[in-house]
Structure formats: C-alpha cells, structure tokens
C-alpha cells in the first residue's frame, strides 16, 4: 500500500529541488525529516511539508504504521515557466524565466 503527496507550482526550479529530493530518496521517514531540517536549501522546507503530508495520508487514509514508512519514490517535474521581459541597452529586451516545479513523494511500508 502506497501513500503519496504532491506539491504543485512550487516557485523554484526543478534543478534546485532535485538536489534536496536526492538526499531523502530511499530513507526512512524520520531520517528524511532530520536530513531536511538540517539542510540549508530554501526548498527543503517545502519538501518537508510534502513529506509530512504523505505521512499523514499514509496514517489516516491507508492506516499504515508511521514508524515503518520509507520514501519509496521521490521526484521533481518541471512546472510551467512564467516569461517576463527586462529592458536592456539600445531598446532591446531579454527574457527572464521564472521557473516552477511539481514535487511528488511516495511512501511505502518496509
């Protein structure tokens, strides 16, 4: 039985979020939370929130034991990119890409 949680349209690039997600993949949930709490990355707070949501889903929906859970799958997909223009010299403009991402965490008993 798997429980999952997802955060969509997180205002960070997928590349930055993958650095944090790679730290917790395959770990037990208490180890993963400890790793996220000690991380200096800003997106680690969002990832911790998704992990806690997946734990609550596992406990309340599927009646799984929280002490036996581990991170089975964790991945980040790219979300939509907002495009903005910035004025540059001689009447030109450059595009600023404001990237977003979708974070998914799947837990399982092990």
Image: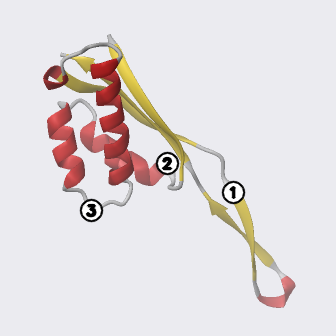
In space, the residues marked 3 and 1 are separated at their CA atoms by 26 Å
The quarter in which the C terminus is drawn is top left
Q: Is residue 20 left or right of residue 82?
A: left
Q: Residue at x 35, y 44 (%)?
A: 49
Direction top: furthest residue: 1
Left or right: residue 80 versus residue 69 is right
The residue depicted at 32 percent of the width and 60 percent of the height is: 41
Residue designated by label 1:
82
Name the residue tied to disc 3. Answer: 40
Coordinates of residue 99 in the picture (x, y in percent): 59, 55
As drawn, which residue projects farthest toward the right?
91
Residue 14 is marked as 2
Foreground: disc 2 or disc 1: 1
Label located before the other in sequence (2 or 3): 2
Q: What secondary structure is found at the residue carrying circle 3?
A: loop
Q: Are marks 2 and 3 in contact (CB under 8 Å)?
A: no
Q: Nearer the viewer, residue 18 or 51?
A: 51
Closer to the camera in the image, 87 or 54: 54
- Quadrant position of the N terminus in the picture: top left
In this view, the residue farthest toward the bottom is 90
Q: CA distance from mark 2 to mark 1?
A: 14 Å
- For label 2, the crowd category at 10 Å Cα-Cα, with few meaning under 14, some 14 to 19 and many 20 or more, is some
Location of residue 63 with respect to 94 vertically, above or below: above
Sequence-earlier tag: 3 or 1: 3
Q: Judge whether 48 appears above or below 99 on screen.
A: above
Q: Secondary structure at mark 2?
A: helix
Counting from the top left corner in percent of width and height, residue 58 is at 31, 21
Nearest the viewer among 105 and 55 is 55
The CA span between labels 2 and 3 is 17 Å
Q: How far across and how far down the image is residue 16, in percent?
A: 43, 54
In front of the other: 98 or 51? 51
Q: Secondary structure at mark 1?
A: strand
């Amino acid at each position: 039985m798997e429980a999952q949680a997802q955060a969509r349209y997180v205002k960070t690039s997928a590349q930055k979020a993958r650095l944090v997600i790679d730290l917790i993949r395959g770990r037990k949930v208490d180890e993963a939370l400890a790793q996220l709490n000690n991380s200096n990355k800003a997106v680690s707070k969002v990832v911790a929130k998704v992990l806690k949501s997946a734990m609550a889903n596992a406990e309340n929906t599927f009646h799984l034991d929280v002490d036996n859970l581990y991170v089975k799958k964790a991945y980040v997909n790219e979300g939509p990119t907002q495009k903005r223009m910035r004025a540059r010299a001689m009447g030109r403009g450059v595009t600023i890409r404001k990237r977003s991402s979708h974070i998914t965490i799947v837990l399982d008993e092990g």
